[in-house]
Image: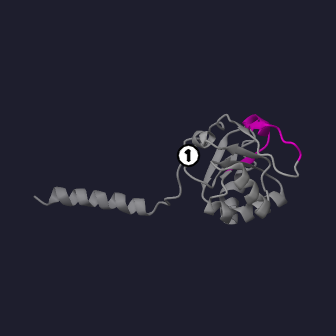
Amino acid sequence: MRYAIPLLILGVLLAFFAVGLQRDPRVLPSPLIGKAVPAFELPVLALPKAESPPLSMGNAAFAGKPYLVNFFASWCAGCQVEHPYLMQLAKQGGVTIVGVDYKDADADVRQWLAARGNPYAPILVDLDGRAGIDFGVYGVPETFVVSADGRILHKHVGALTPEAFARDVKPLLGAGS
């Protein structure tokens, strides 16, 4: 009897531990799922050989069609992994990819995109990370699926892969239209 309570506590702790081991640590639920995209107005990154972009853009510019918001940076290893797939998505068309250059120097991202290509339309600059905070970004890369009516439908943490796109993103692109 004197061991019953400690054994019961140990059993409960082991059950919590077993459940925790079954979860993917990269999956961080977002409290923004189903809610409106946080209002943002960010500077647009001007690229060489491109038409003069507007000085800034906000979420209102993308209303009426689903789109992806991809937080990335030139210093991010995961961004280098996902970039070829983002280039492929951009070539296929069908979805606008809004790039948000997160806490990165303009010159560094210009050089990075010149070497790898630009899948983004447009690239917005979040130098101080405030838009990232509003979106609940923990690190880069993170990609948000936004519906045509401006609601966040999904948050993907880490490099976006063809498998993750087919499983988690593509089915949502027509949702909420």
Q: What type is the residue that disc 1 sits on?
A: Ser
Tell me if I can see residue 69 in this picture: no
Q: Is residue 123 magenta?
A: no
Q: Which residue is nearer to you in this view: 71 or 153?
A: 71
Q: Residue shown at 79%/60% (left/top)? A: 114
Instruction: Tell me the colour scheme of the image.
Output: one colour
Q: Position of residue 115 (x, y in %)?
A: 77, 63
Pick the quarter of the image with the N terminus. Answer: bottom left
Tell me the element at label 1: loop
Locate residue 154 relative to residue 113 in the image: left or right.
left
Splitting the image into 4 quarters, where does residue 83 fall? bottom right
- Residue 171 lies left or right of residue 53; in this view the side is left
The C terminus lies in which quarter of the figure?
top right
Q: Locate residue 156, reporting x and y percent.
A: 62, 54
At horizontal 65% and vertical 56% (from top left) the residue drawn is: 168
Q: Which residue is mark 1?
A: 30
What residue appears at the point 70 percent right and 61 percent down from the top-left corner? 166
Q: Which residues are magenta?
A: 51-70
